[in-house]
């Protein structure tokens, strides 16, 4: 019984510490919350772009980043999806593994999971295109693998970013 109580207290204290080590960015009607171990960088055409630190990169032999973009022109989700897939075909070894229509809150969305090679570096990507006020918001989580022979399961690696993806709010 004491072990159970101590274990529960450990998990409660851990979640409190984790919640205190988060950063939230609110920008142009979007918000995203991520660990303090990640950092934001300014990237052209991205409203928000965050990525792991060098320490995280060294531990996993990969680099995970999340970018949020918004289309400049009005566009339906269906039209955007067609254009997006044509653009993705420019990557070497491009393959869509999952494409699923869903609702993101009250907004129509499409979620992709695909693999490709960019400048000889294998990458795995989870992308969510969200229809919002006549435009499209594209959220892209990308893992670049620097040592493909040591590649871990992408689902395990991306599980740490899943919480970040779920934190995104669109007004």
Image (cartoon, rainbow, N blue to C red):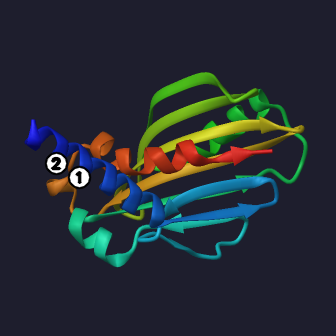
Q: Nearer the viewer, residue 4 or 76?
A: 4
Total marks in image: 2
Q: In the rendered image, is residue 49 in sight?
A: yes
Residue shown at 39% from the left, 74% from the top: 53
The quadrant in which residue 114 appears is top left
The quadrant in which residue 28 appears is bottom right
Q: Where, quadrant-wise, is the N terminus in this rendering?
A: top left
Checking the image for residue 10, the label placed there is 1
Give x and y (percent) for residue 50.
54, 66
Residue shown at 51% from the left, 60% from the top: 34
Q: Residues within 10 Å of mark 1 (few under 14, many from 20)?
A: few
Give the residue at the far front of this rendering. 2
Placement of 83 over or under 32, stated as above or below: above
Residue shown at 24% from the left, 62% from the top: 60
Placement of 15 over or under 83, stated as above or below: below
- Circles 1 and 2, Cβ within 8 Å, touching? The answer is yes
Residue shown at 22% from the left, 67% from the top: 59
Q: Nearer the viewer, residue 117 or 66?
A: 66
Check disc 1 and report its element: helix, strand or loop. helix
Disc number lying in front (1 or 2): 2
Q: Residues within 10 Å of mark 2 (few under 14, many from 20)?
A: few
Q: CA distance from mark 1 to mark 2?
A: 6 Å
Describe residue 139's horizontal placement relative to residue 22 as left or right: right
Check disc 2 and report the residue beneath it: 6
Give x and y (percent) for residue 103.
67, 24
Describe residue 71's horizontal placement relative to residue 15 as left or right: right
Give x and y (percent) for residue 2.
10, 42
């Amino acid at each position: 019984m004491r072990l159970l109580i101590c274990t529960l207290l450990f998990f409660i204290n851990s979640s409190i510490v984790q919640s205190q080590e988060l950063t939230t960015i609110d920008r142009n009607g979007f918000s995203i919350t991520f660990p303090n171990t990640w950092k934001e960088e300014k990237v052209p055409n991205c409203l928000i772009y965050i990525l792991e630190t060098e320490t995280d990169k060294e531990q996993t032999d990969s680099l995970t980043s999340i970018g949020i973009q918004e289309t400049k022109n009005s566009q339906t989700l269906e039209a955007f999806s067609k254009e997006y897939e044509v653009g993705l075909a420019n990557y070497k070894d491009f393959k869509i593994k999952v494409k699923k229509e869903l609702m993101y809150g009250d907004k129509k969305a499409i979620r992709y999971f695909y693999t490709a090679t960019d400048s000889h570096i294998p990458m795995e990507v989870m992308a969510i295109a969200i229809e919002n006020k006549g435009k499209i918001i594209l959220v892209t989580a990308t893992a670049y693998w620097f040592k493909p022979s040591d590649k871990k399961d992408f689902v395990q690696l991306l599980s740490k970013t899943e919480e970040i993806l779920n934190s995104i709010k669109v007004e």
